[in-house]
């Protein structure tokens, strides 16, 4: 029998703010974190906009000499995990040290470091490569550093499933606790690849918005005039715990996680099937795992990337799974404000879904001024909605046709 699993801590480092409350309040206001790229000179790039994390001080978490040896995605991950851990009130003891895991997601790892040291190799030779190069770039370094920082000796894993990585991490942490492999876990996603190579690469795929003259309006999921996603960065971490253990220590419970689904499109390296059947199978699998009928879902935090294909296909997939109930659902894409954080997206959006349940507030889909006729569902346009909801779903779909969905329930 599966054990019940709840969320007891949340930590966010995003373009909307450093910390959960700052990020959440900006999200509910419909504030955008998107602007011109400042990380490098993007004047020769087709897409010159991004959602960058602003005001992050790594020395709040690391000694100054350590900062240069950690890629930014690791710094964000550790900071978000530390915030989640502190908000949970959990501590490592002799009794639980082997029963607390860390399971994170990351799509691309330390690409800026790879880009930097490829230049060093070409210009100065191999002897000038830092010995920290490999530890800076490996995608599982967030889970490693978080484990070392907090002293967690349970399962230590990293999902590298593109834009579904954060969701897969949360889902796997849920399963590890539900089936007794550990009693608690720090989980979520982290990513930071706002660098010339990544922006140039996604631009070459025609995946990014080129609305360079109006950055805050560039991410417009489900809108007729959408033209691609906006690259973003950040980290979102949660602490999951077995319910009875959380209750015994009097923890704040934000929500219960009750379902997890996975599927493969087996179709294309980057595009979803036109009928969205892979995403539909994934949502259906998550509902089965949760023991819910489709009519019992109140809200979906959509993958909603603002790309022509994704938004249309996700809408169709939702209709195929939920039938007439699809038109009664509230749906929003928070990427309209945060941009697309790639491997971090699922962790951050799972946290947003939990906060929606906890606060009874649904984030808006910003910039949805002219709905696409093919996207005709209720996407909570422009303004947040106060609505008490009981069950909610968070969707993530990644290149390679990998899909992940998690389902949460309001804890009463």
Image (cartoon, helix red, strand yellow):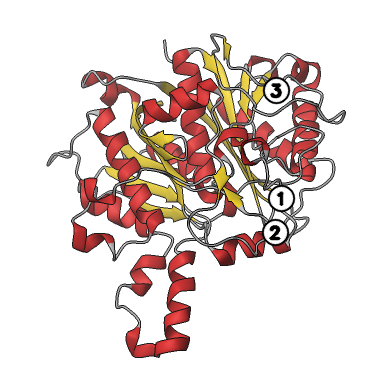
Of helix, strand and loop, which one carries label 2?
Answer: loop
Q: Is residue 247 left or right of residue 20?
A: left
Q: Are marks 1 and 2 in contact (CB under 8 Å)?
A: yes
In the picture, measured across the screen, residue 93 lies left or right of residue 340, that is left
Task: Decide if residue 61 is in sight here.
Answer: no
Q: Residue at x 79, y 44 (%)?
A: 309
User: Label 1 to label 2, Cα distance in Å?
Assistant: 6 Å
The residue identified by callout 2 is 46
Q: Residue furthest left?
A: 94
* 176 left or right, relative to 90: right
Q: Are marks 2 and 3 in contact (CB under 8 Å)?
A: no
Label 2 to label 3: alpha-carbon separation = 29 Å
Q: Which residue is mark 1?
A: 210
Under circle 3, the secondary element is: loop
In the image, 57 versus 353, the foreground residue is 57
> Mark 1 packing: few (<14 Cα in 10 Å), some, or many (20+)?
many
Task: Count how many numbered circles sit on residues in the image.
Answer: 3
Which numbered marker is on residue 379? 3
Image quarter (top left, top right, bottom left or bottom right) of the N terminus: top left
């Amino acid at each position: 029998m599966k054990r019940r699993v709840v969320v007891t801590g949340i930590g966010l480092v995003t373009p909307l703010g450093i910390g959960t409350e700052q990020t959440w309040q900006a999200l509910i206001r419909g504030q955008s974190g998107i602007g011109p790229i400042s990380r490098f000179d993007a004047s020769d790039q087709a897409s010159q906009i991004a959602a960058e994390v602003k005001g992050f001080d790594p020395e709040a978490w690391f000694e100054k000499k350590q900062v240069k040896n950690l890629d930014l995605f690791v710094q964000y991950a550790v900071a978000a995990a530390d915030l989640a851990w502190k908000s949970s009130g959990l501590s490592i003891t002799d009794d639980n040290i082997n029963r607390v895991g860390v399971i994170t997601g990351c799509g691309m790892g330390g690409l800026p470091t790879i880009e930097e040291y490829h230049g060093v190799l070409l210009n100065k030779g191999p002897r000038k490569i830092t010995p920290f190069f490999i530890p800076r770039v490996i995608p599982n370094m967030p889970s490693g550093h978080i484990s070392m920082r907090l002293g967690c000796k349970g399962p230590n894993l990293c999902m590298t499933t593109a834009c579904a990585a954060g969701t897969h991490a949360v889902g796997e942490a849920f399963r590890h606790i539900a089936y007794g492999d550990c009693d608690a876990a720090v989980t979520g996603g982290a990513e930071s690849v706002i660098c010339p190579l990544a922006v140039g690469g996604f631009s070459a795929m025609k995946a990014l918005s080129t609305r360079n003259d109006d950055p805050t309006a560039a991410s417009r999921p489900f809108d007729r005039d959408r033209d691609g996603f906006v690259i973003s960065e950040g980290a979102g971490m949660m602490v999951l715990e077995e319910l009875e253990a959380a209750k015994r220590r009097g923890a704040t419970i934000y929500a219960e996680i009750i379902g997890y689904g996975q599927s493969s499109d087996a179709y294309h390296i980057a595009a979803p099937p036109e009928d969205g059947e892979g995403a539909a199978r994934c949502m259906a699998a998550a509902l089965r795992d949760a023991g819910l009928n489709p009519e019992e879902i109140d809200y979906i935090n959509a993958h909603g990337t603002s790309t022509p294909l994704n938004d249309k296909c996700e809408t169709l997939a939702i209709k195929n799974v939920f039938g007439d109930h699809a038109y009664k659902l509230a749906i929003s894409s928070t990427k309209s404000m945060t941009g697309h954080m790639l491997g971090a997206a699922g962790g951050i959006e799972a946290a947003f879904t939990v906060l929606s349940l906890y606060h009874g507030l649904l984030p808006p889909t910003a910039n949805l001024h002219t709905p696409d006729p093919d996207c005709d569902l209720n996407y909570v346009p422009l303004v947040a909605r106060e609505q008490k909801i009981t069950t909610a779903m968070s969707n993530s779909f990644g290149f390679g046709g990998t899909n992940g969905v998690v389902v949460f329930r309001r804890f009463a």
